[in-house]
C-alpha cells in the first residue's frame, strides 16, 4: 500500500512538473511571438550616405527616416534620437535601408584615409550622373572598367546613331543620388517629375577626355557598357538604324 502511494505521489509530481514545463514553454513562445510583432521606431537611411557626409546634411537632404522596426531586428546602438548624431559625420558608407548606429558616426578626423579617391597619375576624377536605363546596376563597383557609349544625332549624320566614346574606362567610385522632384504651384510634386534614384560614377579620364565627356553630355545621351578588352569596336564607330538588322 505504501509503495502504491509513493508511486502515486511521484506520478502527481511528474505530471505537475510536465504541466509546468509546458506552461513555461508556451509562455516563452508567446513572448517570442509578441516580440516579433512589437516594433520600435529607429532612424534608417533612405539613400546612400557617403563617408564624411554629416548627419545634419543627410537629414536636410531627407536621407533619414524614422521607421518602425521589429524589436528582434533592431541593431545594438540603433536609436530614434537624432541628437545622438549631432556634429558627426559618417565614418563609412551607409546604405539605403540600413539602421543608423552611433559607432558608424564620428568626427571628420576619424574618417579613414581609405575613403579618399586614389586617382591614377596623369588622370582626372570626372563625375557623371546616369539614370536607371544608362547604367549597369550592381555590376560596376569601383575598379571596374567600362565602355562609354553616346547616342544622338551628330553633325556628320542626319539620323540617330550610337557611337563608342571611350573603351576600358576605370571607375573610381560610384553611389546613389536623388533628384528632387519639381514642385507645382501648390507645393506638390508634378506628375511628370522624376524623383527616382540616379547613379553617380566617378571615372578616371585624362583632362582632354574629361572635356570630351563634358561636351558629349550636351550633345547626346551617355550610357555605360561592359566591353571585353579585345572588342573589335573602335572609338567613333557608328551604329545607325540601318545596322539594327544586319546579318539577319
Image (cartoon, helix red, strand yellow):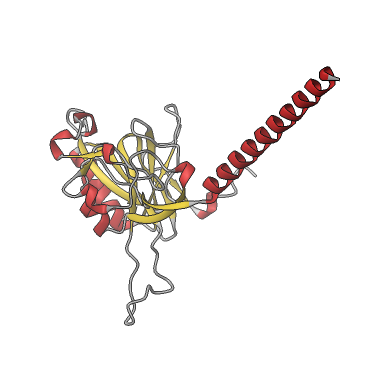
At 19% from the left and 45% from the top, the residue drawn is 88
Residue at the front extreme of this rendering? 1
Residue 184 position, x and y percent, is 34, 78
Residue 186 position, x and y percent, is 34, 82
Q: Is residue 132 visible?
A: no
- Please give left or right for residue 52 compared with residue 171 in the image: left
Residue 6 position, x and y percent, is 78, 21
Quadrant (top left/top right/bottom left/bottom right) for the N terminus: top right
- Please give left or right for residue 116 compared with residue 130 in the image: left
Q: Is residue 83 above or below residue 183?
A: above
Q: Is residue 204 visible?
A: yes
Residue at the top extreme of this rendering? 3
Quadrant (top left/top right/bottom left/bottom right) for the C terminus: top right
Residue at the left extreme of this rendering? 109
Query: Which of 152 and 91 lies nearest the eye of the viewer?
Result: 91
Q: Is residue 83 above or below residue 232?
A: below
Query: Which of 192 and 244 lies nearest the eye of the viewer?
Result: 192
Query: Which of 202 and 49 lies nearest the eye of the viewer?
Result: 49
At 48% from the left and 42% from the top, the residue drawn is 72
Quarter-of-image position of residue 194: bottom left
Residue 224 position, x and y percent, is 40, 43
Residue at the bottom extreme of this rendering? 185
At 42% from the left and 71% from the top, the residue drawn is 192
Amino acid at each position: 500500500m505504501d509503495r502504491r502511494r509513493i508511486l502515486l505521489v511521484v506520478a502527481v509530481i511528474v505530471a505537475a512538473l510536465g504541466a509546468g514545463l509546458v506552461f513555461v514553454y508556451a509562455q516563452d513562445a508567446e513572448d517570442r511571438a509578441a516580440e516579433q510583432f512589437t516594433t520600435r521606431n529607429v532612424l534608417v537611411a533612405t539613400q546612400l550616405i557617403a563617408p564624411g557626409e554629416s548627419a545634419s546634411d543627410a537629414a536636410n537632404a531627407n536621407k533619414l527616416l524614422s521607421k518602425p522596426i521589429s524589436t528582434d531586428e533592431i541593431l545594438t546602438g540603433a536609436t530614434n534620437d537624432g541628437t545622438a548624431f549631432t556634429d558627426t559625420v559618417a565614418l563609412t558608407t551607409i546604405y539605403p535601408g540600413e539602421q543608423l548606429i552611433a559607432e558608424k558616426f564620428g568626427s571628420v578626423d576619424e574618417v579613414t584615409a581609405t575613403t579618399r579617391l586614389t586617382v591614377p597619375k596623369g588622370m582626372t576624377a570626372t563625375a557623371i550622373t546616369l539614370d536607371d536605363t544608362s547604367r549597369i546596376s550592381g555590376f560596376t563597383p569601383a575598379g571596374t572598367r567600362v565602355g562609354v557609349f553616346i547616342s544622338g544625332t551628330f553633325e556628320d549624320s542626319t539620323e540617330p546613331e550610337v557611337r563608342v566614346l571611350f573603351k576600358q574606362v576605370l571607375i573610381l567610385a560610384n553611389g546613389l543620388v536623388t533628384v528632387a522632384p519639381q514642385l507645382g504651384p501648390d507645393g506638390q510634386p508634378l506628375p511628370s517629375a522624376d524623383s527616382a534614384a540616379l547613379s553617380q560614377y566617378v571615372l578616371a579620364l585624362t583632362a582632354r577626355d574629361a572635356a570630351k565627356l563634358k561636351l558629349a553630355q550636351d550633345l547626346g545621351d551617355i550610357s555605360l557598357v561592359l566591353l571585353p578588352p579585345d572588342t573589335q569596336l573602335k572609338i567613333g564607330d557608328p551604329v545607325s538604324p540601318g545596322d539594327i538588322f544586319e546579318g539577319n
